[in-house]
Amino acid sequence: MNRGWHLLAPLLAFGACSLLHDELPNDPPTVHLARMTCQSPDTASLDTLINSADAVCRVQRGGEIRFEIRAADEDDDPVFYEWRAPAGGSFRDSQAQETNSWFAPQTIAGSSEQFVVQVLITDRNCATVPDLADRQHCAEEARVLVENFLVEVVQREPLLEVTSAASSAFSAPQIFIDALGTDPDGDRLEYHWEQMAGDSLGIWPEAIRDEETARQIGSRAVVVAFFPGRYELRVSASDGAANTEREIALYVPIEPPLPTGGMVRLVLPTDQAYEIDAYEYPNAKGERPPSASFFQAARLCAAEGKRLCKPSEWRAACQAGQMRRFSSTDDLAAYGSRDHFGVRFCNVPGSAFSQFSTNPADQLAPSGSFPNCDATGVFDLTGNLNEWLAALDDAGDLAVYVAASSVSSSGVCDGASLVGTLSSGGQDPYDIEVLAGIIADSPLQNYEQPLLGFRCCR
């Protein structure tokens, strides 16, 4: 604080009449005590600054500073106070005597701004003089002392706690990342999430609230990675003026690694065990499955000592004993509003591969491209290729089915439909020679479509 007193006008010649003392010169008031008490934004404790010309009181936006000033007049005149803050803020009472409070503005320019709070101390209260001439004479006689206090109003950045790195297996349907924010000034915070690097990612923010007060104390990002790999995210917390940012490295691996091929042992609801290829023929991870006629499919399975899968076997592998509609741990409906869902679900309409071409054959994915498209360790039962199935009917004939779920149609796990029946004349219809004879004149001999393939069982 600093002070100085100013004569508002030269002293009148001796003999001129003052309002209170006609013969004596009018001396200015003097200050005996001047101090301010403020709330320190750094320590949250009360700091008292007394009679220091270099003292600066720091307070947050909207904070309160309490002033105390005591003055006296050598002429025994009463003293009057007027409080001013030219640059902004407000007083509890601009005419308060000796004690008053000043409230900092709610908004400032930049991270800090200084304000001068003034107290004008005078030995005349000329505003109460009714006569204009007497009021003017009063003003000429009055002596004014100006006391200045220097205040710094600060805008402090929000504090933000968030993990700097996170990892979650691609098989997890969702990843949760929490950002907890606090503001030293008590301001309400707004949060914003964004992706900085990596493949397609879905981010759905939701508020984290205190259980007792329901006040928001943070933001949770519900993250869905549509491809395995590495990602970079950024979260920010803003109080409307200051902004705090944090970056998160997110790693989404395929865990455990997918098999290169082989067969998966499963059990039917009837407790009968069987084995089924992990991938569509040729049952090799990374290979694009070919289309085939029914005879080609049956012959290729027989060459490996296997057979085409039965509808009950295919359905059991697809549903995993849980009556699932699709052979995936993901929910297709959750991504219906997106342009594509990457490799998150299966190779059906809306997948990353279905965007490649208008030709369905070009939209086929190499086996293992959709890590979550398995309910039992058997991949691509939903999507990619429709599959040939076969089973003996009650008459001992071979009934031929097609499990209709491909890149162009997202069929369900119980969607196998009967194509036709082949009579074997009492012979074993699974025998390749018998099979070759009975379908020689059948349309199934050459029934081959671009999206019709198979896998083998035993």
Image (cartoon, rainbow, N blue to C red):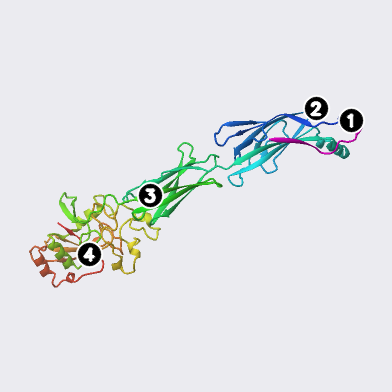
Label 4 sits on residue: 453
Q: Main secondary structure of the magenta part?
A: loop
- SS at circle 2: loop
Label 2 sits on residue: 74
Labels 4 and 3: the sequence-earlier one: 3
Q: Can you tell which of label 1 and label 4 is closer to the viewer?
A: 1
- SS at circle 4: strand
Cα distance in 3D space between marks 1 and 4: 118 Å
- Residue 55 lies in quadrant: top right
Q: Which residues are magenta?
A: 1-18
Label 3 sits on residue: 250
Amino acid type indicated by mark 3 = Leu
- SS at circle 1: loop
Neighbours of disc 2 within 10 Å: few (<14), some (14-19), many (20+):
few
Residue 83 inside the magenta-drawn segment: no
Labels 1 and 4: the sequence-earlier one: 1
Label 1 sits on residue: 22
The image shows residue 146 at horizontal and vertical percentages of 74, 36
Neighbours of disc 3 within 10 Å: few (<14), some (14-19), many (20+):
many
- Residue 344 lies in quadrant: bottom left
Residue 12 inside the magenta-drawn segment: yes
Amino acid type indicated by mark 2 = Glu
